[in-house]
Every structure is written in structure tokens, then in C-alpha cells.
Amino acid sequence: MRVLLILLHLAVAFALAIEQQNTITNKVPSIILVEFTEGAQESPDVIFNTIEQRLIDYECIVTRRHTFSSPSFRGLSFGLSCEGDRQTVRSGILPMIQSLDDIKKASSASRGHQTPQHRQQRSQQQHGALPEGTSQMVKRQGTTTTNGGLYESPILPTHNDTGVWRLHAEGTLGTGMRIAVIDTGFDLASPGLSQTRVTYNYNYVEDAFDFTGDNCINFLHGTHVLGIIAAESEERKFGVVGVAPNVTVDLYGLDPCEGAVPGGLDDFMAAIESASSKGVDLIMVGYGIGLAFEEEPVARLVSQAVANGTAVTVGSGNDGPGLFTGGSPANARGAAAIGSADNSATPYYTWRANFTSGDEAGFIRYAPQFPANFPAGNNLTLWSPGPAEGLPEGCNPVPGGFVPPTDPANTIMLIEEDHCWLGPGNTSTRLALGLGIPYVLRYQAASASVVDGMQWRPGFAEYSRDYKGIARISNEDGLFLAGILSNGSSVRISVPSNISEAQEEVLYRDNDISGGLVSGFSSWGPTPEGKSYPSFIAPGENILSAFLPRFGGVAVVGGTSMSNPFAVGVYALVKERHPDYDPQQILAVVASTAKPVRFIDDVRQKKEFLAPVFSQGGGLVDAWDAVHTVSVVNVSSLDFNDTAHRPEKLDFSLRNTGTETLKYKLSHLGAASGYILSEADPYGLSGAEGHPMYADVDISPAEVELVPGGSATISVSVRSNPALPATSRGISFGGFIEIVSSASEANTLTVPYTGFGARLVDIPMINPNASHLVKVDPDTNIDTEVAPDTLFTCLFNGTIPKPAWPVSCDLGFPGFRKVFVTASREYTYDLVSADTGEDVLTGTFRGGAENWAAPSSWWVWDGSEEDRKYVPPGAYFWRVRALRLNGDVGKMGDWDVWDSGRWRLAYDGRSIGLPGNGTIG
């Protein structure tokens, strides 16, 4: 959700917590993932029994979870609950397990969350408020384009824009296709899903073959996703129907309805392996982690599924804009990484709340939010302590002299959603909650635009689950109501308590700012290997789809989590009409028939040139052309990589599958080039940057004629890089090979290509300006920067049973925070004596391509490393080594090395069991 419970611009992350868990607790409930060696002799049962016996000494409870038998990943997972801390798990238990026979790697598979930041622009919406001096109930004008640009539409604009509706009209509905959907969970009681064909559903967390509904907040994401793919009902409320409404679906849920701990990385992996083994046609993966290499375990399982003949789509991520913001397993070989495009028309799904002020009466339209427990027949007093506009975003002290409400329990607070109020005296207590106000009416900031719409987005400054009811209105309506209050008048508002009172409606406004262009949050490529990414884009921002019945059964949500199901629905339509297409051919056809789109920068200004290929891939999906083209290529992109690895030429085949001889003309379409590194920061990556300067490209042949069934080989080479001036920042570029045929329809293909006008190994890996020494509070897990030469006085107690840490320090644990520019294929941490230069803890940690690592993370010494190896009093520093992109492990010059500032260690005189050297405890 950004966090699944509450935020919806999301890509959910599974944090492989060996290095990046950054959590210290007194008791460790963990999930351990074990990968077997290639030639493992023992069975999984024997290996598990061996692990279980070894962990008895650590006072750990072990519970078997999953066994993996894929050719790309053989291993098992188990639950682990120990008296200790997660830091000790990675420094003690994990190395012990990894040292056992037949085990290649042991890592934590406990789940964490990323919160990809969706750039929040603002939106204004017409209100139905009373004009001054009007006493009767005022109704909104007719739903036509004359009503402030708002109008009704019986057809989803996304289906119109991409040719989906035309395919539906000719009877292409995904019939006979079976899709596995891996997501949070699904509320099958949603009215828009009443005729959706579900053949299998399983919740990994609750171990239940059932998704019956219950309005589970954790299932809202999966419900919306399922609706985009396969919504079907007799009513088709507000025109909501899936891209492929006749498909059958297998549902895999990884979140509990509520209360329980969400599923782990191993559940995610098990779902992929299970879906692949069941022989489905397509898999949609609704989860992901951050930027990683193809060797990452989930990516390997996805690649194996594709190799076995199952096409897989994954959202590219919501960490854009900017280079290297993608993730895994969208980077898996053969998978389709789906970026997001903004809806061409923004839908506004709203309910009606009536208000009165003196003798006047009117109504406002609002978007239902969470929570929504408004009492039946309510008539709430609107209250505000004062205007928040002009104050810093976030929480501010309540204005002096404010007057609290006389009846807080029946009061609803009006607040601009980028702000919140603290109690008197600038306490940490929220004002409204402290006063006993249970309801909030939030309004959008003045900077809102049609780009944002008014989505179901619970997260805002004042948000708290302690509120009973929250409603979201436009900035215009918010200011209108605030104006009444500022004039000294009172306002009473009746907010519907359920859908039967809602007088719901959906109206659209054309998005003439960014409609059809790359969404501001959509992640960009390349992959860490330097390959093209994403594959293409699909509608993902401001998408109307099925939702929890409690909130009306439909909602508007945005993210690559929405473009991904749209894409897999298109895949189903293509596969229905071309059952012989394998995953590679489907991807090639859909990517090459997509339409390249114009560039829009980070302030949402459209340009007259094409967006970087690293932001849009092949362009906006065109389902009609993908189904109807008779001209097909065998690649989805051409990867020229960097100058050190650039091939002289790349070939692809062009084939005429039609019944008529076709003539083809091939030409070059340049797309925006950019820099890898930021102009302001030599260790920062560039953002939404694009310049209308292009590589020189040779295409041979430039014309070709193909008889039915005929094919030709097309060769492409990069003659020169774009002539951008600041070459030290590294240059990225891309474009399209445009192929125009003499066919009567679906006659244009575009093959995207990408490359770099630099060696990627010249791009720094470690940011020394952001990396620093820290102290970490074991109670809060918060790290704080400390100055060089900081003294840590630590109490050692060797009588504390393993695997708990044996030391406690006066300032917290000594450590460091490292910041990588991008993903490193191999990196190490060492503790080094400042006096002798000796590695005291050699290879404290080693990370590699098989581990996802957060670019910024901390590490600490807690005394448990290397089986409690003694670290004498003295001065030390941390040494971090990281291999640069495309670097050679054997070349010292391809590594970045960062030495932290010096820190000093002393032991408290009350320490127990300190030896002169060696292992203790």
C-alpha cells in the first residue's frame, strides 16, 4: 500500500534482511530461506533435521514452511523464533547454517515494506456548494462537458485509448486463458467481481482456500488489481469491466485479512513456483523488491517460469522518475516490466454529503476514505482551529487562542491534507484526538491538479487509525467551507454511513496535462546489468476498478500496481488470438506495437520530443495493434549497454505472417537522452531528465519486401553517442527503429533500443558524502550520526546465552550508515584497527548479486560477530568495499573503497568474562 494497510501508490517490498533489516529486538521471530548447493546429496527432510538439531543450542523454535524444487532455486524455508536479536541472527545463526553441508546460502526472508514515493501533485474539482444567498438545496449541473469539464462515460477511457474496447466489441475477451494473480488478497464479494471466473484461491498467511470478502482492508489492493484484469458483472457499475473479462483466474494472497503477520519472501516465492507448476498461461506478480540483479532468488523463479512457457508481468515500481529506480523481479529474464501512464481522463468517484449553514443548505462531493465509520443519521458540527495554509507542511502547533468544540464527539475537523495540528504547547499529541474529535474532513492542497484526481488514498498528514471516519474533498470545497467558518457561521454536515445513502457518481475530466504520458512515479531503467527497462507502459494512474464493498465497490487508485494487471489482461487478449505465441513472442509483439510517447518532465511540462526509452520502454500499450499486426519481430528491445561492452551491431528478425506481400521502410526515431549523474551531486543519480539530442544509428537494410511467411534480418549499430556536453556525468540514450509496412492496419512497429555513452564502471558506487559513523539505539532501532573519535564504552557480559548480543554500550551500538549510488554486484564490510591497519573482523558482511540491499542501510557491532570474537579496546574504523557496475572483481580499480571516520572502544570495568584475546562466552 505504500504501506499495505493504508497507502495505495505502492510497490510492496520483501526486505532480504541479512544486511538491511536494521532491526534489533530481544526476541527474534524470523523466516530463514536456505538455498541448497547444486550437488546437494541429502534430501530436504534430512537437511532440515540437521538445521533443527543445530539450533537447539541457540534456544530457537524451528517451524518448517516451504520446500523449493525449481531448477533455478532448490532449498527450503523455516520459521525461527529465538531469544536474541536479528543482528545476532545474521552474525551468528546465519553463518552457522550456511556452514553446513549441502547449503549454499542462508538468509532472512522476513518481510519488510518499501514505501515508494509517488509524487503527489494536487487536483481541483468542481464542488456542489451553495452560491451565496441561495436557500434551497442546490444540485450539481447536468453531467456534460459544460459542467466545469466534468462528464460521464459509459466506457473506461483506458480501454478506449489502448484498443481494448475495440477488441471486446469484436469478441476478444480473454476466453480460454488462465491467469495466476499474486497479490495481497481479494474481496470476491465486490459487486464488480460477481461474475469473475475464479478457479483457485489460496491465502498463504491464513492457510485457507477461500477469499470470501469481509471488507478486509489488506485485500483492497488485490481486489482493485483483480478488477482491472477480470472484473465482470451483470451491472458493470460505472462501466467497470476487466481488460480480459472472460479469463479464469488463480488467486494467491500473501496478506492476512487483519492482525496476523504478513507473508514472507518465501511465501512469495512459493506462490510463483506453485503458479508456474499448475500450467497457467500467464502470471501477474503484484509484489517486488528494490533494484537487484538477475541472480536475486525471486527473479530466478520468474525467469524459470518464463523458460517453462508461462509469460509473466511485473510492475516496474513506483520509485521514479530517474535512472536505476526499477526493481526485482521485474528485471527477470523474459519477464515484462510494466511502467505506468497517466489516465487520459481522470475519474472522480464520489459520495454526497449534505450540509446546512443557518437557513442555507447544500451538498459537497467527497471521496470515501479509510476509516469510514460514520454513525447512521449523523449531523456533525464542522470545526477548524484556524487556517493551515502558509504554515510548513506536516504538524504545527495549534494557533493561540483557538476555541475547542463544545461537543467533540459529534464534531468533524476541517483540515488541509498536507497539514496537521498538535495540541497546545506543541506536544506530540494530535489536537483533534486529544480533544476527542473522531472525524476528519480533509481537503486537497491548492497545488492539486487533474493529474492527481481525488483518489482513495488514506495517507495524509493528519491520518490516524484512531479516527472513526475520514472523508476527502477538493481544495475548492475545503476553502468554501473554511470561508463560511471564518465568517463566524456554523456548518452542520451529514456524512453517509453506508453505500445506500451515498448517492454515488463517477465523473471524468480530461487530463490535458499528462494524459497518456509516463506517470511521475513510474520507475525507470536500466537494470543493474545495463539492460533496457521497462518493457512498455500501460494505464496506471487514476484507474477506476473494483474495490471493497464497504467503500462502494469501486475506487480510483494509481501505481504500477495498476498498470501491471492492465498489461497482463492485454497479454491474455493477444494469447487468445495467437495461442502459438510463446512468452518471448508475446513480449516482442506487445512492446513493438506500443506507441512511443512524448516526454513530460518532473514538473509535468510536456515536451515536443519523445520520452527516454528508459522511462517508457516500447511506449503505451496498443492492444488492438498487438492482436492484429501481421508483421512481427523477435525482440522486445535492443541493448547496446555501455561503451566498454557495446556490440558492433545487433540483429533482429522481421517476419510477415500475413497473406499478402508487404513492403517495409525502416528509419530511426530518436528519444530523449540524459545524464546518469546529477548536475548538483556527483554521487547522485539524475531525475526526470531528457534532452532532444540523439545517437547516430545505422539500420540495414532500410527497405525490405516480404512475401507471406517471409522474414528478413535487420542489423542496427550505434555510430556515435548523443553530443551532450557534460560527458563526465555519463550519458544515457535510446530511441526506436520504426518499421512502417504497406499493411492496411496495424502497420507500424517500433523496436526500442538503449545504450550509454560512457563506461558504467566509471560511475561511482559509494557516496562518501552521505556515508558516516552512527550509533544505534537498540530499543528504537534509530541510528544517529556521530562525530569521528566518538568513544563507546561497552559493558560485556559473557554469561549471556548465545545468540543474544553480549554487550551493551553507553551510547548505543557503534556502527555506520553506508549509501550506495546504485546496486553493487559484490560488497563487503570490515572492521579495521586504526592503529595497525589489521582487519579485526574480516568479512564482517559480504553481499552480492543474490541479495537485495537497500542503497542506504546501517550496520553495527554488538559483540556477537564471528562467534563473539574478542575486539580489544582501541581505535577502529569501518571499511566498505563495493564493486562498481559492470566491474571486474579481479580489478582493484573497479572497486570503490570507503573508510569511515575513526571510533574508539572501551570496556566498562564491570564487564564479565573479558579475555585477553580469542573467542569468549
Image: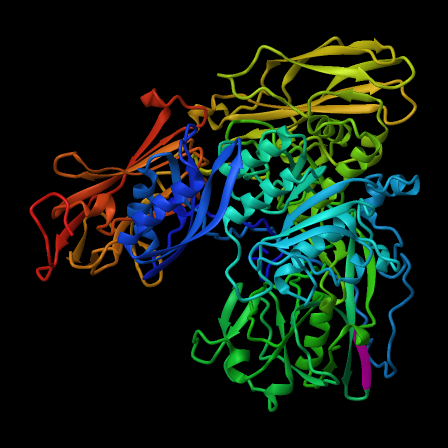
- Residue drawn 34% across and 39% down? 98
Q: Quadrant of residue 833?
A: top left
Relative side of 901 to 398, left or right: left
Residue 205 lies, in percent from the top left, at 55, 57
Residue 737 is one of the magenta-drawn residues: no
Q: Position of residue 152 (x, y in %)?
A: 88, 58
Please provide the residue range marked out in magenta. 360-364
Figure quadrant of the N terminus: bottom right
Q: Residue at x 56, y 86 (%)?
A: 404
Q: Position of residue 581 (x, y in %)?
A: 76, 27
Q: Nearer the viewer, residue 822 or 909?
A: 909
Instruction: Provide the major secondary structure of the magenta segment.
Output: strand
Above or below: residue 266 compared with residue 837:
below
The foreground one among 364 and 113 is 113
Q: Position of residue 414 (x, y in %)?
A: 64, 75
Say if 74 sits above or below 207 in the image. Answer: above
Q: Is residue 679 visible?
A: no
Which of 537/250 is in front?
250
The residue sitting at 40% across, 35% down in the picture is 42
Q: Can residue 88 be seen by looking at this rendering?
A: yes
